[in-house]
Image (spheres, rainbow, N blue to C red):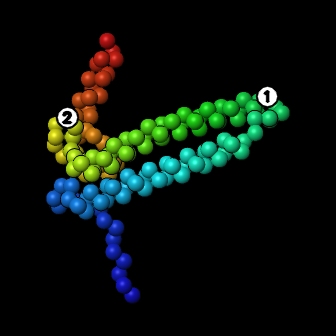
Amino acid sequence: MAKKKAPYTPSKDEEFMNERQLDFFRQKLEDWKEEILEGSKTTIHHLQQESSSLPDVVDRASAESAKALELRTRDRQRKLISKIDAALRRIEEGTYGYCDETGEPISLRRLEARPTATLSLEAQERHERKERTVRDD
């Protein structure tokens, strides 16, 4: 019986953003996008099927509230797809995985957790501190 190969996980012991890592993140982003698009199709189908002719006012209000929540969620996911597309473009351009602010590599752990990241953790924290300071004024 042949041994199953363990799934690939990028390692800091290898060259940063080598072909294998780029393929790993490209696939991760494409799978994520496909999952979101499938969910959108389900939402659209669900919204088209749902009848707004519910006889009870409370049921109608509840259904409308659920629709509004679903649409807000889909809007956030639409914005996420834009970020995924931008990340895929960065892969093609050879800039994926590098901080927009410092040009330094973004940690692999951060990219695995948030593959659309454009800032290193340190740069993101600086950005958030600056944002809080501006908001507090």
Q: In the rendering, at what x and y percent does residue 120 appear?
A: 23, 40
Residue at 44 percent across and 50 percent down: it is: 33
Quadrant of residue 80 within the rendered picture: top left
In the shown orientation, is residue 110 left or right of residue 80? left
Residue 117 disc label: none
Which image quarter holds the C terminus?
A: top left
Residue 57 disc label: 1
Which residue sits furthest top? 137
Whether residue 12 is visible, yes or no, is no
Q: In the rendering, at what x and y percent does residue 42 appear?
A: 60, 49
Vertical order, 83 against 112 (above or below): above
Residue at 22 percent across and 37 percent down: it is: 100
Mark 1 or mark 2, which is nearer the start of the sequence? 1
Residue at 35 percent across and 81 percent down: it is: 3
* Residue holding disc 2: 101
Determine the CA span between mark 2 and mark 1: 52 Å
Q: In the rendering, at what x and y percent does residue 68 appear?
A: 61, 32
Q: In the rendering, at what x and y percent does residue 7 appear?
A: 34, 67
Nearer mark to the viewer, of 2 and 1: 2
Q: Secondary structure at mark 2?
A: loop
- Mark 1: few, some, or many residues within 10 Å (few <14, many ≥20)? few
Which image quarter holds the N terminus?
A: bottom left
In the shown orientation, is residue 82 left or right of residue 19? right
